[in-house]
Image (cartoon, rainbow, N blue to C red):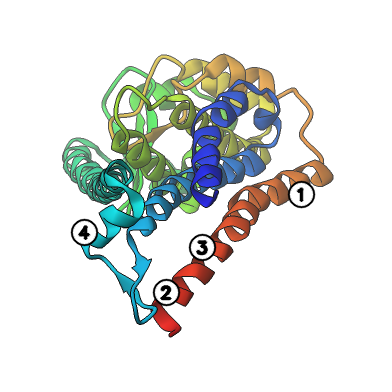
């Protein structure tokens, strides 16, 4: 029964639930709460999938004569039957493979992303120059300006982070719009939105192409932009940000960077005039996220852990 419940949870949290959440309109009005919910769903889906495999594999642990578990294949085949024993072994092997693939993917995504950022940061530092302005915003140590006519504005997260602008950005944006852009990029850097995106990217690439969907990754990418937009609105107001978004809408960030433009510009501009969710609604979403992560896991895992405790630690 535990395996069935974990399996159903994994299927629901990796299929219908993400599809519903990606198609919903309310997350754009409560981006922080929605991002927490997405993280909870992703983590609960992974834990449920692993738990389902481990519960099935635990059938291979039968109490021996002394009450402790035995893994003698002949004994297990006699107890379970050949087909059930082979199924349990294959499920356990598949669980180990998926776990190894997930860990490997996390490491690969992290290493590859940081290498790209390091190379791009070196190129930016070589090609950029200092802007002669009395505005203290333009003299920050992490700010770089490129001699490019196209309006560019993005950040390179990390310990040696950079905020990159172009001549086109400085020429086409007003002071208020520039304030909004800088606030947007620094919001990404302070909140380390790149780490959230890395985690969802790793989970996305860890699963086979036939079963994975881009809905979670795309939705989370939009949500982190909305959170940065909110910081920009606080710094400069909605209209300067809207104009800046339109100006930079045709540009996109290089791999590993986060840009102010290029991501669902129309949705983000329309959202600036829409009402925000209330504190009560956000609290309800946080409670739902906690319930999705904690309640099913505890309700199903406790009986299973009790059984393992009986097998391994009690005579």
Of the numbered discs 2 and 3, the one sitting upstream in the chain is 3
Separation (CA) of disc 1 from disc 2: 41 Å
- Which residue in the protein does label 2 denote? 311
Residue 160 in the image, given as x and y percentages of width and height: 29, 54
Q: Earlier in the sequence, mark 3 or mark 1?
A: 1
Secondary structure of the residue carrying numbered label 4: helix
What label sits on residue 283 in the rendered view? 1
Q: Label 1 crowding class (10 Å Cα cut-off): few <14, some 14-19, many 20+? A: few
Q: Which of the pair 306/69 is nearer the observer? A: 69
Quadrant for residue 138, please give it. top left
Q: Answer yes or no: is residue 284 visible.
A: yes
Q: How many marks?
A: 4
- 2 and 3 marks in contact (CB < 8 Å): no
Identify the element where label 2 is drawn.
Answer: helix
Mark 1 vs 2, N-terminal side: 1
Q: Pointer 3 and pointer 1: residues touching (CB < 8 Å)?
A: no
Disc 3 or 4, which lies upstream in sequence?
4
**Disc nearest the viewer among 3 and 1:** 3
The location of residue 243, given as percent across then percent down, is: 58, 19
**Whole-number angstrom distance, CA of label 4 to CA of label 2:** 19 Å
In the depicted view, which residue is nearer to us: 246 or 12?
Answer: 12
Q: Earlier in the sequence, mark 4 or mark 2?
A: 4
Front disc: 1 or 4: 4
| Residue lying at 49% horizontally and 34% vertically, measured from the top left | 14
Distance from Cα at disc 3 to Cα at disc 4: 24 Å
Residue carrying label 3: 304
Residue 74, numbered label? 4
Give the quarter of the figure containing the C terminus. Answer: bottom left
Mark 4 is surrounded, within 10 Å at the Cα level, by few (under 14), some (14 to 19) or many (20 or more) other residues, namely few
Left or right placement of residue 119 versus residue 1 in this view: left
């Amino acid at each position: 029964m535990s395996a069935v419940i974990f399996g159903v949870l994994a299927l629901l949290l990796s299929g219908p639930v993400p599809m519903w959440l990606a198609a919903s309109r309310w997350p754009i009005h409560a981006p922080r709460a929605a991002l927490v919910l997405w993280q909870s769903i992703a983590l609960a889906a992974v834990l449920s999938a692993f738990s389902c495999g481990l519960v099935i594999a635990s059938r291979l642990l039968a109490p021996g004569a002394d009450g402790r578990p035995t893994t003698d294949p002949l004994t297990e085949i006699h107890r379970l039957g050949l087909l059930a024993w082979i199924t349990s072994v294959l499920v356990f092997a598949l669980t180990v493979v998926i776990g190894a693939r997930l860990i490997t993917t996390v490491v690969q995504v992290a290493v590859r992303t940081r290498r790209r950022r390091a190379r791009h940061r070196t190129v930016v530092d070589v090609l950029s120059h200092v802007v002669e302005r009395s505005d203290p915003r333009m003299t920050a140590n992490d700010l770089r300006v490129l001699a490019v006519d196209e309006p560019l504005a993005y950040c390179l997260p990390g310990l040696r982070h950079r905020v990159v602008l172009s001549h086109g950005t400085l020429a086409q944006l007003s002071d208020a719009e520039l304030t909004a852009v800088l606030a947007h990029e620094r919001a990404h850097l302070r909140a380390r939105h790149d780490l959230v995106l890395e985690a969802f990217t790793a989970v996305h690439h860890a699963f086979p192409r036939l079963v994975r969907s881009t809905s979670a990754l795309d939705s989370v990418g939009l949500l982190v932009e909305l959170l940065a937009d909110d910081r920009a609105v606080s710094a400069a107001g909605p209209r300067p940000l809207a104009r800046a978004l339109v100006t930079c809408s045709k540009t996109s960030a290089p791999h590993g960077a986060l840009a102010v433009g290029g991501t669902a510009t129309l949705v983000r501009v329309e959202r600036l005039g829409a009402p925000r969710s209330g504190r009560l609604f956000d609290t309800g979403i946080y409670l739902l996220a906690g319930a999705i992560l904690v309640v099913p896991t505890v309700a199903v895992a406790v009986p299973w852990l009790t059984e393992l405790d009986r097998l391994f630690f009690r005579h």
